[in-house]
Image (cartoon, rainbow, N blue to C red):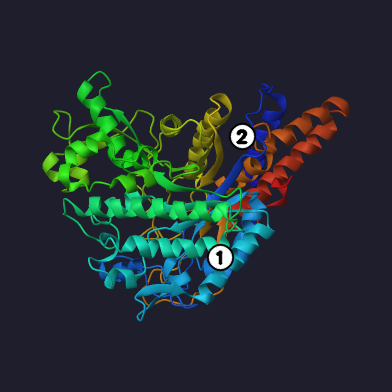
């Protein structure tokens, strides 16, 4: 082991200065004891085992092979085989919940005789084992029924294909019904869909995501209607099962929605103010308003006209109130102006036909003080759009709360996109600031937020690439990881190494406090107490101990390690 003498002296100096400088006392910022701190994954992004256990292809397995330069998730994090160890790491951190998704094409398979999906016993057994392992460790399961990985069979055997077909609604409800029957007494938090904005707007609007449709002025709207009706019917079935005790009496269901918060470029300009509200309506209200009111936002109905399919009276009634809890993902905020304004850098003609053009805004501006991701050592910036403006998180929570102040809110994703590095201090800065905004919502403003979920626990497959790194744990991906032909990782590959944010979350999750527990403060207080009661010589010994600890931690940070160090345990 090589020790850095300069590092040792630096640590000694810091410890000595801290010992002599008075520290102002402040009241710790603490959450309620029943507040949940958790993390999240999604099946296609972490599981791997793409052709094991009876799993059949999804549209993402096909899409990643069709797009030039796109990587695949045959192996991903190999969570399918390594989940017991990963759950142990979550337990080490002290996290109370894990949001995960079911792979539809693992849980069910296509039956050509009935032309419906049928249960796959081996796939269902895997999810029983996973959920049982979570519950055994005291980790609350939050189950996402659909996280974008539609079985390829439903893409190819329905006309029109996949989510464009009205038939998809019944197929989805059959799938959701099976999930309720299988896991209803093991899971209390359910979500029907993850981010319909993304898999509708980007899959059938801009074409970024599978199946890659773009340019249609109507497809995204058609898909959104089918998704919302499927959601409402699944919630109806869930509530029937809850009444009949098929699912737990306290189980709750919702839909995970995502949006940036939008600020007007010029708050004194009525057109910019209207553009900011319109952006929220098109991105968030598109799916929020129907479940609250039974219909789309008025501005969407006005701008899209007949291209936006209308709900029947029965569908509208079924949609209204189809949630037990609000669930929200949020990452960044934007500043907007009309696409045809003098300040716009985005011509209206450049916007994709349909949802994006109907929204009609230039959203390429940022609030002052916005955190921006850094390029990696090769100059690549995989995270360009993932900026960070902490006050926008609180504004987004307030906005959601205003739609129904009586309902609880579960924050289901929030996180920082970084590069291939373990010591990602920007990530820690982001989390400290954003969780601080959650504290304001919960404690200062009494908004009923019941939990916060960090995205994500592991670096994972980010829909075509392994470049964006969101994990609390760094994962050592190899050059082969994203290959369409790669299937069997070496046991030593994909090592998990905790980032500084994982160590910070350990203290936050276990104490439910954001401050007042710093390990350095604790040692410094011990030093000060010792010097007062025993004398200077004991204080010097304590300072040396601090320096030795700092040197050990520095060494471990540089070389990586799997489990959280004991210095962080309570």
For this orientation, the residue located farthest to the top is 268
- Please identify the quadrant where the C terminus is shown: top right
For this orientation, the residue located farthest to the left is 349
Question: Considering only vertical position in the picture, is 17 above or below 305?
Answer: above
- Graded by Cα atoms within 10 Å as few (under 14), some (14 to 19) or many (20 or more), the crowding at tag 2 reads many
Question: Considering only vertical position in the picture, is 528 above or below 70?
Answer: above
Q: Is residue 35 left or right of residue 393?
A: right
Marked residue nearer the N-terminal end (1 or 2)? 1
Residue drawn at 40 percent across, 60 percent down: 466
- In the rendered image, which residue does mark 1 sit on? 182
Disc 1 versus disc 2: distance between alpha carbons? 38 Å
Residue 431 placed where, x, y %? 51, 40
The quarter holding residue 522 reads top right
Residue drawn at 62 percent across, 65 percent down: 84
Secondary element type, mark 1: helix
- In the rendered image, which residue does mark 2 sit on? 514
Toward the viewer: 202 or 111? Answer: 111
Instruction: Tell me, yes or no, if residue 564 can be seen here.
Output: no
For this orientation, the residue located farthest to the right is 534
Residue 339 placed where, x, y %? 17, 35
Toward the viewer: 228 or 423? Answer: 228
């Amino acid at each position: 082991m090589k020790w850095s003498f300069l590092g040792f002296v630096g640590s000694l100096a810091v410890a000595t200065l801290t010992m002599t400088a008075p520290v102002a006392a402040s009241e710790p910022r603490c959450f309620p004891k029943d507040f949940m701190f958790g993390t999240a994954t999604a099946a296609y992004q972490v599981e791997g085992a793409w052709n094991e256990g009876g799993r059949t292809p999804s549209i993402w397995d096909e899409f990643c092979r069709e797009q030039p330069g796109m990587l695949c998730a045959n192996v991903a994090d190999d969570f399918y085989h390594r989940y017991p160890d990963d759950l142990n790491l979550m337990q080490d951190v002290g996290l109370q919940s894990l949001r995960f998704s079911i792979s539809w094409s693992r849980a069910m398979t296509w039956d050509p005789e009935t032309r419906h999906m049928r249960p796959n016993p081996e796939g269902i057994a895997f999810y029983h084992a996973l959920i049982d392992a979570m519950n055994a460790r005291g980790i609350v399961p939050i189950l996402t029924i659909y996280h974008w990985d539609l079985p390829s069979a439903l893409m190819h055997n329905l006309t029109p294909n996949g989510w464009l077909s009205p038939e998809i609604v019944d197929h989805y409800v059959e799938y959701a019904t099976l999930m309720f029957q299988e896991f209803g007494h093991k899971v209390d938090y359910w979500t029907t869909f993850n981010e319909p904005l993304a898999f509708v707007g980007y899959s059938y609007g801009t074409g970024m995501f599978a199946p890659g449709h773009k340019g249609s002025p109507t497809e995204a709207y058609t898909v959104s209607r089918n998704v919302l009706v499927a959601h409402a019917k699944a919630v109806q079935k869930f509530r029937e099962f809850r009444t009949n005790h098929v699912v737990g009496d306290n189980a709750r269901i919702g839909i995970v929605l995502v949006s940036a918060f939008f600020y007007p470029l010029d708050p004194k300009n009525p057109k910019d103010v209207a553009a900011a509200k319109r952006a929220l309506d098109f991105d968030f209200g598109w799916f929020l308003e129907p479940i609250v009111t039974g219909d789309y936002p008025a501005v969407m109905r006005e701008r899209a006209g007949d291209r936006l399919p209308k709900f029947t009276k029965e569908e509208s009634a079924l949609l209204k109130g189809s949630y037990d809890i609000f669930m929200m993902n949020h990452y960044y905020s934007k500043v907007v102006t009309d696409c045809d304004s003098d300040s716009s850098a985005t011509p209206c003609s450049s916007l994709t036909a349909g949802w994006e053009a109907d929204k009609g805004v230039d959203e390429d501006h940022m609030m002052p003080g916005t955190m921006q991701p850094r390029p990696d050592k090769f100059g690549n910036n995989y995270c360009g759009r993932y900026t960070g403006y902490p006050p926008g998180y609180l504004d987004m929570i307030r906005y959601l709360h205003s739609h129904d102040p009586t309902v609880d809110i579960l924050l289901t994703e929030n996180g920082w996109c970084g590069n291939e590095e373990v010591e990602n201090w920007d990530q820690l800065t982001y989390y400290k600031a954003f969780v601080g905004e959650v504290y304001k919502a919960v404690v200062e403003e009494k908004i009923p937020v019941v939990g916060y979920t960090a995205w994500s626990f592991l670096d994972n497959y980010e829909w075509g690439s392994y470049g964006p790194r969101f994990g609390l744990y760094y994962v050592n991906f190899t050059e082969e990881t994203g290959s369409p032909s790669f299937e069997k990782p070496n046991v030593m590959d994909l090592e998990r190494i905790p980032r500084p944010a994982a160590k910070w979350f350990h203290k936050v999750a276990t104490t439910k406090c954001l401050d007042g527990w710093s390990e350095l403060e604790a040692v410094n207080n011990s030093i000060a107490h010792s010097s007062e009661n025993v004398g200077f010589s004991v204080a010097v010994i304590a300072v040396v101990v601090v320096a030795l600890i700092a040197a050990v931690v520095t060494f471990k940070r540089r070389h990586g390690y799997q489990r959280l160090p004991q210095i962080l345990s309570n």
